Image (cartoon, rainbow, N blue to C red):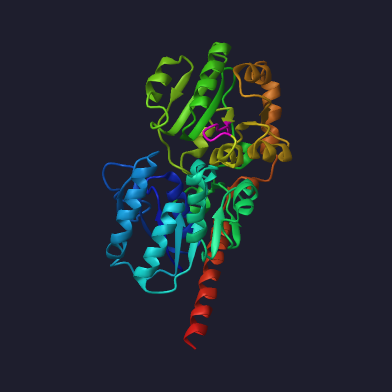
Amino acid sequence: MLHVLYLVHDVSDPAVRRRIIMLRAGGAEVTLAGFRRTTNPIADIEGLRPIDLGATRDGRFGQRLAAVAKAAFSIGSRLGDTPRPNLIIARNLEMLALARRARSAFGASVPIVYECLDIHRLVLRKDVLGKALRAVERFLARDVKLLVTSSPAFIANYFKPFGQVAAPIELVENKYFEAAAILPGSPETHGSPDEVASPVGPPWRIGWFGALRCRRSLELLADFSRRMEGRFEIVLRGRPALSEFPDFHAFVESEPWLSFGGPYRNPEDMASIYGDVHFSWAIDFFEAGQNSEWLLPNRLYEGCRFGAVPISMGDTETGRFLSKQDIGILLPKASPEALEATLGKMDEHRFAGLKAHVLARNPRTWSYDRSDCRALVERLRSLTAVSGSFAAEALA
């Protein structure tokens, strides 16, 4: 069985849980180690007890660097009881530095995989800091065996133009995991796509789910809902980034047609939360012109899997993806007026047509199943075979 040491920047990130589920469903054994954004250590993630590397703070780059430097000196002892892994996956740049230290601690030629699912704005700066960070990334990634990323635009706009990573690239999209195929004890099916029901409208509900970090989206949706005077409601679920808008809860409570339903579990709660809305907000201005325009977010795949009509900007990677699929609502401009012009006269007939277009697409466009998990693990296993052959040649 392939044994993976998974080093992550935030063990409480729901995306970390999803990757662990995928690796284990594909037949891998996983040891998890990483930092946390919580006050107390995380006790359990999918039956795993994470090796705690300490606390970091969202948006505090300097503090995170100090935490990484401190962990670099102690990671050998913290992994002391861990059997030597066959492979190390480093999620994000800071963990790539620790991956090399961990490999040295095991005293073996363990292949490293670099998982980068966001391009941080700091590495895109044109000043000395940006150039220095890119140089650090190139140095740390000089001998990684595989780069895992989630959007073709990350490759086209960052990794290839800047020459950051010479390793082969594996595109693993942020697709929904079919819980019935992956989670033990799950029901046989959540229902085929053509069985997905939506509430009767109006009011029409726009769901914005996941990592809520974009103040501009929040204010835009609030303005639009007020203009529509109750014909549209905005439903928020997930984890708000309070470092970006510390007044998030007060703001939502002050808006008559906004509501926040708290966190949810993915994939277990997906059918119910998306089944309660008509549209999925797939827009992010958090890093406009850069990461926000290049990513293909989780909510794109999850919403479409359950028949929510996606809303995006036409000039983004998400918008281009939807245009190729001939589905969704593409806004020409990010304004309440543009939303009103595009959605304001929504009726049951038009919505039924929009939803039918989404549901008509191949479900595998939106979802991974157990066969995809196995394929990923086999791809990772192949790296250990190559590494092992090189090590044997070196000893010969």
**Residue 134 coordinates in the image, percent (x, y):** 52, 52
Quadrant assignment, res 282: top right
**Residue 364 coordinates in the image, percent (x, y):** 64, 49
**Residue 277 coordinates in the image, percent (x, y):** 55, 28
- The image shows residue 346, relative to residue 286, as above or below, that is above
Q: Is residue 111 visible?
A: yes
Q: Which quadrant of the figure contains the N terminus?
A: bottom left
| Rendered residue at 59%/20% (across/down) | 201
Q: Nearer the viewer, residue 124 or 11?
A: 124
| Rendered residue at 58%/42% (across/down) | 295
- The image shows residue 28, relative to residue 389, as above or below, that is above
| Rendered residue at 52%/79% (across/down) | 390
Q: Nearer the viewer, residue 34 or 262?
A: 34
Q: Nearer the viewer, residue 73 or 50?
A: 73
| Rendered residue at 41%/27% (across/down) | 245
Q: Residue furthest front?
A: 128
Quadrant assignment, res 341: top right
Number of marks present in the image shown: 0
Q: Nearer the viewer, residue 18 or 370?
A: 18
- The image shows residue 334, relative to residue 165, as above or below, that is above
Q: Is residue 184 visible?
A: no
> Can residue 284 be found in the magenta stretch?
yes
Query: In terms of secondary structure, what is the magenta stretch mainly?
Result: loop
**Residue 26 coordinates in the image, percent (x, y):** 51, 61
The part of the chain drawn in magenta is 281-288
Q: Residue furthest bottom?
A: 396
